[in-house]
């Protein structure tokens, strides 16, 4: 029994260390990505606009989705309106609300950034053997569930 407990503790420590290293690498990659603005969008702008690929949204909804405050989202949207990547129109169902929509130029910029990130994920996947990709996909899906529950 003690051997099993020791093995479990060692596995837990190894997992914790590996997760720490993974998150550190992910933060560094995120930092590098935030400095790139290919496609005309910063990483923060991309996260704010990504939900608009499915249709118009309110400032509050975009702020929640991007995990930024409403005032921050408003300032970001102001910049994107000035760049003619999004428009603001009165919500026909609620005069107090404003809907934000992608312009054709905004849709192109978002599409370019999405393609860039898709290519990056595919490059990462290509470094793994097919079985490793299957195992990683399953594990990442499980980890996503666990993280969302925290």
Image (cartoon, rainbow, N blue to C red):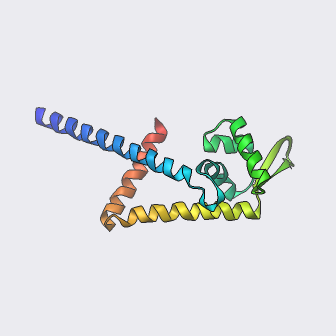
The number of numbered badges drawn on the structure is 0
Q: Is residue 123 above or below residue 51?
A: below
Name of the residue lying farthest toward the front: 35
The reply to whether residue 57 is in sight is: no
Find residue 119 and report its horizontal and vertical position in percent.
49, 65
Find residue 21 and report its horizontal and vertical position in percent.
34, 44
- Please identify the quarter of the rendering in which residue 41 is found: bottom right
The residue under the point 76% across, 55% down is 83
Q: Nearer the viewer, residue 54 or 33?
A: 33
Q: Nearer the viewer, residue 75 or 135?
A: 75
The residue under the point 42% across, 65% down is 123
Q: Is residue 148 above or below residue 49?
A: above
The residue under the point 31% across, 39% down is 16
Q: Is residue 65 left or right of residue 57?
A: left
Q: Is residue 89 left or right of residue 36?
A: right
Find residue 64 and report its horizontal and vertical position in percent.
64, 40
Q: Is residue 18 above or below residue 103?
A: above
Quadrant showing the N terminus: top left
The reply to whether residue 64 is in sight is: yes
Q: Nearer the viewer, residue 124 or 57?
A: 124
């Amino acid at each position: 029994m003690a051997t099993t407990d020791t093995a479990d503790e060692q596995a837990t420590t190894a997992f914790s260390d590996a997760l720490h290293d993974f998150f550190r690498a992910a933060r560094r990659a995120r930092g590098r990505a935030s400095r790139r603005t290919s496609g005309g969008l910063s990483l923060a702008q991309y996260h704010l606009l990504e939900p608009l690929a499915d249709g118009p949204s309110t400032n509050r909804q975009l702020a929640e989705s991007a995990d930024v405050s409403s005032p921050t989202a408003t300032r970001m949207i102001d910049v994107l309106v000035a760049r003619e990547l999004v428009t603001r129109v009165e919500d026909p169902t609620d005069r107090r609300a404003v809907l934000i929509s992608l312009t054709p130029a905004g849709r192109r910029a978002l599409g370019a950034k999405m393609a860039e990130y898709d290519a990056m994920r595919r490059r990462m996947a290509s470094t793994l053997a097919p079985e490793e990709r299957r195992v990683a996909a399953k594990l990442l899906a499980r980890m996503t569930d666990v993280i969302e529950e925290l």
